[in-house]
Image (spheres, grey):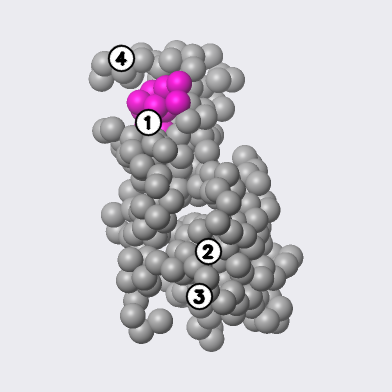
């Protein structure tokens, strides 16, 4: 099955291990990931400092490239930005007209049939992972963490991680903080706010006797690794899935020492 997807900038640096695990899973599941041709940065959070409309244009350009199709988005912040742009272009005729004019300069048309934006977490619920689970895998308890951008303001299926990890053989530990903020893009230089937010998330996972925390967002994973004290295993949910399916840790971006 061929799937059109938006890799996002983090696939090349911050979250390279995330994308290695996605590619490894896709290969095993016979999914052909087709990167959106000529895609560009969605603007991340830093674009908020730019003049009004710049971030919308960046996201809209990707939507124009994927017109009429379903677009799989792997990064939760990219999902937020593309979903937000789609909503604005559908509901605000003035912005739609402005952006459409700008896109004409690149030979692109803003079609009325904007793509459907689909998060990776929801997409993978279409797959029965119990069929692919390695017979040698012995599941261990994990907690899940969605973070902000998959839960608001455009909520996805907030049972998706539990569904796919349970099907793969993991006992999933229920927690109360799975959609709470980790601090996101707050200044990371010894930030007491981020420290407190991250440590309470990991404290709950430990208290519930989870052996690790499965995350879906590159920024969340970075914050939890930096500010986790004492350290606690934090991996992308795709890495946990790969382990259950018998994929080598090195193919999943997991260092050998882990």
Q: Position of residue 189 (x, y in %)?
A: 42, 71
Tag 2 and tag 4, C-beta contact below 8 Å: no
Circle 1 — which element?
helix
Is residue 64 within the magenta segment? yes
Residue located beneath label 3 in the image? 136
Contact, mark 2 vs mark 1 (Cβ under 8 Å): no
Q: Which residue is mark 2?
A: 133
Q: State whether residue 224 is above or below residue 258.
A: above
Q: Earlier in the sequence, mark 2 or mark 4?
A: 4
Residues 117 and 247: in front is: 247
Can you tell which quarter of the image residue 88 is in? top right
Q: Residue, x 42% and y 22% (percent of image)?
A: 67
Quadrant of image for the C terminus: bottom left
**Of the residues under marks 2 and 1, which one precedes in the sequence?**
1
Label 1 sits on residue: 62
Mark 4 vs mark 3, CA separation in Å: 55 Å
């Amino acid at each position: 099955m061929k799937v059109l997807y938006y890799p996002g900038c983090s696939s090349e640096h911050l979250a390279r291990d995330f994308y290695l695990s996605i590619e490894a899973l896709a290969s095993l599941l016979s999914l052909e990931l087709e990167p959106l041709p000529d895609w560009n940065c969605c603007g991340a959070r830093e674009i908020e400092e730019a003049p009004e409309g710049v971030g919308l244009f960046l996201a809209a350009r990707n939507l124009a490239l994927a017109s009429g199709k379903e677009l799989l988005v792997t990064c939760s912040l990219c999902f937020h930005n593309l979903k937000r742009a789609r909503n604005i272009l559908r509901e605000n005729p003035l912005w739609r007209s402005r952006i459409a004019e700008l896109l004409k300069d690149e030979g692109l048309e803003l079609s009325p049939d904007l793509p459907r934006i689909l998060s990776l977490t929801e997409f993978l619920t279409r797959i029965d992972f119990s069929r692919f689970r390695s017979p040698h895998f012995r599941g261990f308890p994990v907690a899940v963490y969605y973070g902000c951008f998959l839960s608001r303001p455009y909520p996805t299926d907030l049972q998706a991680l539990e569904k796919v990890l349970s099907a793969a053989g993991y006992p999933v530990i229920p927690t109360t903080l799975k959609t709470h903020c980790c601090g996101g893009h707050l200044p990371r230089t010894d930030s007491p706010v981020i420290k407190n937010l991250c440590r309470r998330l990991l404290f709950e996972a430990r208290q519930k006797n989870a052996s690790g925390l499965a995350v879906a967002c590159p920024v969340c994973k970075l914050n939890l690794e930096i500010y986790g004290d004492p350290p606690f295993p934090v991996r992308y949910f795709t890495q946990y899935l790969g382990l259950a399916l018998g994929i080598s840790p090195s193919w999943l971006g997991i260092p050998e020492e882990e």
